[in-house]
Image: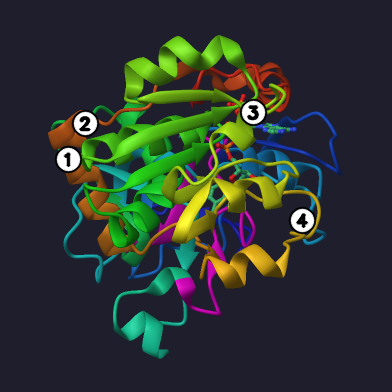
Amino acid sequence: MDPACGLNKEGETVKIQAYAASGPGAPLEPFEYQPAPPNLEPTQVEISISHCGMCHTDIHLWNNDWGFTQYPMVPGHEIAGTVTEAGSLAKSFREGQRVGLGWESGSCGECQYCRRGEENVCLAWKGTCTHGYGGYASAIRADSRFVIPIPEGLDSEAAAPLLCGGITVYAPLAQEVHPAMRVGVVGVGGLGHLAVQYARAFGCEVAAFSTSPDKEAEARRLGANRFINAREEGALEQAANSCDFVISTVSADLDWAAYLNVLKPKGKLCVVGVPASELRLPAFPLIVGRKSVFGSPVGSPSLIREMLEFSARNGVLPVTERFPMARVNEALARLKANQARYRIVLAN
Ligand code: NAP
């Protein structure tokens, strides 16, 4: 037997069926690989994937927007499934347990951030589908530190999008806002429709800024008190000085000066969506209003556990469209065209 082949605990060869792109924007095609090293490492867990959410980051990576995609590339980092095997040191996991895996799959474990449970800002982070093959697949092996038990009250289709989309908006909201605040959510997409729900569940007044007027009814149903059509002439000007905190979940360039203007004095603009160009910001309103702009990457494993519990308890759930894994290219095209309502989940 090829010594590089993946083996299961019975010593049989493990083959993982996946969908991979061979180059930037190329259609995903069936792709089979054998995990290496062959045996599951003691700290690893093997997950049989039942669902994988489709995040816009998968589109950025697929197109090599950020210049570091390696092909063949298997996207997918909103993974839910069941444990098929747990390594000898992954003692808290058992076969058949429902678990999830998000964007981050590794960190140094040694730096000050890892030591205080902030692995998401470790400079040696490893991404699930950037440092290995991702979750548009039948199975995956991962470091058990980043594998998250799914609470009883959350079904796997709902849990999958929370593992990246959910935590990315939950983390800055949970850390930065309080109930008396007015929160603006820019972009009502996969991340944005969850941000609206979390901000409302935290007790905030919520304004949804969207370029899609047809999303208004759903945004209001999810908890938005105000809906602003960001393409409407003068709409952002009218919303000036109305938010303490604005979170941008948009994957495109925005009029950042206009959103700074939406902030009240001392307000914060949190950028989680990744626009194509650099942010251009006027200094004067930042200084005069003592405003700040910051970014935020996903969330630590312990915060992901907290977020899943919170979501299950408060009914913060993604609105999903389920596609069989084999229709992955159709699903990617739908997400790319901003037609997903609101998170596509691939199912095996
Ligand atoms: P998505 O489902 O495609 O949603 C993005 C939303 O942005 C769209 O639904 C749309 O909302 C709005 N939008 C799209 N094009 C626009 C344009 N040209 N002008 C203005 N608004 C536009 O994407 P997602 O999965 O939520 O991801 C959003 C971004 O977050 C991506 O860049 C992704 O890479 C990033 N991300 C970051 C992290 C992190 O750790 N920071 C984690 C996950 C994802 P409306 O129709 O309402 O306008």
What residue is pinned by disc 3? 230
**Quick check: marks 2 and 1 in contact, CB under 8 Å?**
yes
Question: Which labelled disc corresponds to residue 154?
Answer: 2
Task: State the residue at coordinates (55%, 42%).
Answer: 240
Quarter of image, ligand 1: top right
Residue 151 is marked as: 1
> Seen in the image, is 55 located left or right of residue 51?
right
Cα gap from disc 1 to disc 4, whole angstroms: 33 Å
Magenta segment main secondary structure: loop
| Mark 3 beta carbon near ligand 1 (under 8 Å) | yes
Q: What separation in Å lies between label 4 and label 3 (alpha carbons)?
A: 32 Å
Q: Amino acid at mark 3?
A: Ala
Measure the alpha-carbon separation of dots 3 and 2: 34 Å
- Asked if residue 6 is positioned above or below residue 286 in the image, the reply reads above
Amino acid type shown at disc 4: Thr
Q: Is residue 209 above or below residue 288?
A: above
Q: Is residue 49 visible?
A: no
Q: Element at badge 1?
A: loop
Q: Earlier in the sequence, mark 4 or mark 2?
A: 4
Which segment did they paint magenta? 121-144
Of callouts 3 and 2, which one flags the residue occurring earlier in the amino acid sequence? 2
- Circle on res. 69: 4
Task: Name which quarter of the figure residue 198 lies in.
Answer: top left
Tell me which amino acid carries mark 2. Answer: Leu
* Mark in the foreground, 3 or 2: 3
